[in-house]
Amino acid sequence: MGADLDGAVRVAAFNFLKDQTTLHGGSVLPRRVLERGFEFDNRRVPLVGPQGIFKPALCELPLSITTVPQVPGKERPYEDEATYEGVNYRYRGTDPRHPDNVGLRRAMAEGVPLVYFHGHRPGMYHAEWPVYVVRDDPDRLTFTVLAAEPLATEGAIGVGESPRRAYLARLMTQRLHQSLFRLMVLDAYDAACAVCRLRHMELLDAAHILADRHPLGEPVVPNGLALCKLHHAAFDADILGVRPDLQIEVRQDVLRETDGPMLRHGLQGFEGQSISVPRRKALRPNTDFLAERYERFRKAG
């Protein structure tokens, strides 16, 4: 019953995280949500605790591992790092026989999935699951942790061998960067759509001006716009464009359509208006990026 209960708690945890990321509009969740956790069989199951390696009372093995956020001027207790093989996660202390380290070693041996929380800033954590411990390095006092498939909900999927591991490690790193990008962009835009000023976080995205596959398409704020899901989709489809002078244009064929109040108020009504931008000049959209993206929009029209 112990192993069955442990597995059932993990599946419940994964489903809870799936619901919460939908509710919050992305994979970055407030720590208070993780500390509160969820109800399982009339018992509360938190997802994080005071220590990085966390095992709730209902589980036989650790359920989650956490990397705390970097605070300027303050040294992290453990320096975990992302590599081409996964995240190198530091042991609890220096004793390989510490119960927390033994628990992660058992999770590795038994192929048990965990959750990885990466602190982007105090109080806000990127959630990645399921992750697996794929390597133990006592000499360096680290485990290597790797995500299987993004945001899966069931049990062990496995991560395979190289080069699949290198591919999965790259995807995991990209997801970490993209979730941080969303957080930074929404912060810069005061959590409001640059077009319509909508302020519901769960309906806001960080849109790339130049796509992430572009040589200059880095996940940095000057290459981003905070957009609601409607205007993000319209921007990506070249229905809505932003000129280098920040003025909004709507594609001409769409301007001529008659299709009810959503089209009229949601898109056509913003023709000729200007987007809102961050107060800090350093965070405002790169005009060269806007010019290149606007040229694509103009050709599409």
Image (spheres, grey):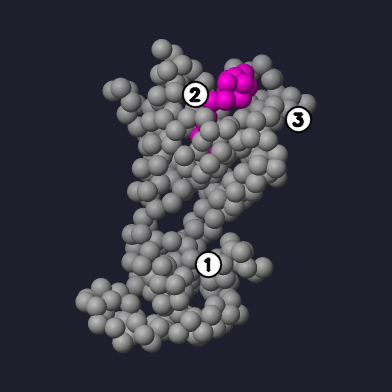
Residue pictured at 44% horizontal, 28% vertical: 10
Q: Is residue 167 magenta?
A: no
Q: Residue at x 53, y 41 (%)?
A: 149
Q: Is residue 25 left or right of residue 161?
A: left
Q: What's drawn in magenta, residue-wise?
A: 102-117
Kind of residue at disc 1: His
Q: Is residue 46 visible?
A: no
- Label of residue 140 in the image: 3
Residue 181: x %, y % from top left: 54, 58
Residue 115 is one of the magenta-drawn residues? yes
What residue sits 65% from the left and 46% below the top?
167
Q: Secondary structure at mark 1?
A: strand
Q: Which residue is mark 2?
A: 55
Callout 3 crowding tier (Cα within 10 Å): few <14, some 14–19, many ≥20: few
Which quarter of the rendered picture does the N terminus lie within?
top left
Residues packed near mark 1 inside 10 Å, few (<14), some (14 to 19) or many (20 plus): many
Report the mark closest to the observer, 2 or 1: 1
Q: Are marks 3 and 2 in contact (CB under 8 Å)?
A: no
Residue placed furthest toward the left? 260
What residue is pinned by disc 1? Answer: 208
Say above or below: 107 vs 272: above
Sooner in the amino-acid sequence: mark 2 or mark 1 = 2
Q: Which image quarter holds the C terminus?
A: bottom left
The answer to which of 279 and 248 lies nearer the viewer is 248
